[in-house]
Amino acid sequence: MREAFDRLSWHYDLSGIVAIGHRVVHGGRNFTGPEMITDYVLDEIKRLGTLAPLHNPAHALGIEAARRIFPDLPQVAVFDTGFFSTLPASAYTYAIDAKLAKEHAIRRYGFHGTSHEYVSARVAQFLERPVEGFKQIICHLGNG
């Protein structure tokens, strides 16, 4: 992380950075919008690594490195799962034992929400329609 910022500073003036944003894959049930990164939020990102083992642990390492390099800058986590947090129960519930699902946080969370949110807004803008109430089908194709 330090080397990346050093190399960026060769080409850009980084003195104007006022905050750092982190895209985090899984926010579980508790993080549905952007969150200021505190020790509690970081611990939860690590804990949620059980739901996103290929992503959240790496996100936590990046956040820790950025906090060491820029300890005075506010840092914010934006969760991919947040975009889908308003799904109705009929859309996020699996046909399994409800007690088991609750105990193990098993539900449909939805992923690539930051991509879906951006594409939805751009389509509405392109078509000169308000994004609120504009029904779209958005497909996130590929693996990132």
Image: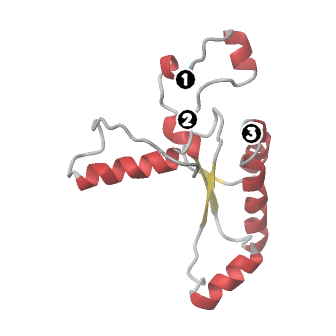
Q: Earlier in the sequence, mark 2 or mark 1?
A: 1
Label 3, label 2: how far apart the Cα atoms are = 15 Å
Disc 2 packing (10 Å; few <14; some 14–19; many ≥20): some
Residue furthest front as drawn: 142
Q: Which one is nearer the viewer's eye here, 138 or 134?
A: 138
Residue furthest bottom as drawn: 10
What amino acid is found at the position of numbered circle 1 in the picture? Answer: Tyr
Relative to 78, say whether 14 is above or below: below
Q: Earlier in the sequence, mark 3 or mark 1?
A: 3
Label 3, label 1: how far apart the Cα atoms are = 18 Å
What amino acid is found at the position of numbered circle 2 in the picture? Answer: Gly
Q: Tell me how many marks there are.
A: 3
Q: Position of residue 117 (x, y in %)?
A: 43, 47
Q: Residue at left 64%, top 61%?
A: 75
Q: Residue at left 64%, top 41%?
A: 27
What amino acid is found at the position of numbered circle 3 in the picture? Answer: Leu
Answer whether labels 3 and 2 touch (C-beta < 8 Å): no
Q: Residue at left 52%, top 19%?
A: 89
Answer whether labels 2 and 1 touch (C-beta < 8 Å): yes
Q: How is the image coloured?
A: secondary structure
Q: Position of residue 57 (x, y in %)?
A: 78, 50
Q: Could you say which disc has been placed on residue 48 in the image?
A: 3
Q: Could you say which disc has been placed on residue 16 in the image?
A: none
Relative to 106, say whether 82 is above or below: below
Q: Could you say which disc has been placed on residue 110 in the image?
A: 2
On the image, numbered disc 1 is attached to which residue? 92
Question: Under tag 2, what secondary structure?
Answer: loop
Question: Under tag 3, what secondary structure?
Answer: helix
Quadrant in which the N terminus is drawn: bottom right
